[in-house]
Amino acid sequence: MPQELAHIALVVDDYDEAIAFYTEKLGFRLVQDTPQSETKRWVIVAPPGSSGCSLLLAKGVGDEQRSRIGNQTGGRVFLFLSTDDFDRDYRALCDKGVTFVRPPKSEPYGTVAVFQDLYGNLWDLVQFALA
């Protein structure tokens, strides 16, 4: 039976500010924004051209969930944004004010730089080396 990851839940503080960051700063598309109750929404964003896994923006509720906002992986890189043109996308993200915490670097697997999302989660922008 074929399987694939559909969504990764990303705990956020506010739906609208998260949507703005992902669509305006990272250029993601808003796939879905459906109210589920007075306080809960089903919000999906995805990188341009992506047909695979997307992000489910999940508003943190209660102290336990809210304590994870911005640090879902204990300070490790959490998400990996793959690109076919590292220089183009690195410049575009810098121009939009995205904060890079580690500069571009060549690794055996490709070119990579680490940036933060609006809450401090760490992401790799990576162009994988051709095998």
Image (spheres, grey):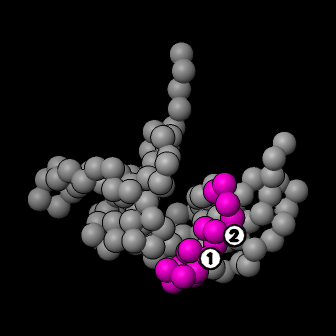
Q: Residue furthest left?
A: 38
Q: Is residue 68 magenta?
A: no
Stretch in magenta:
83-99
Residue at image location 49% in from the left, 48% down from the top = 49
Residue at horizontal 45 percent and vertical 73 percent from the top:
25
- Residue 69, image x, y percentages: 44, 69
Q: Residues within 10 Å of mark 1 (few under 14, many from 20)?
A: few
Q: Where does residue 108 sit, x and y in percent of width and height?
A: 88, 56
Name which residue type carries label 2: Asp
* Residue placed under numbered mark 1 in the picture: 91
Find residue 81 and report its image quarter: bottom right
- Secondary structure at numbered mark 2: helix
Q: Give the quarter of the figure containing the C terminus.
A: top right
What's the CA distance linking mark 2 and mark 1? 6 Å
Residue depicted at 69% across the width and 69% down the height: 87
- Please state which amino acid type lies under the numbered disc 1: Arg
Indicate which disc residue 87 carries. Answer: 2
Up-down relation of residue 45 to residue 72 (above or below): above
Image marks 2 and 1: residues in contact by CB distance under 8 Å = yes
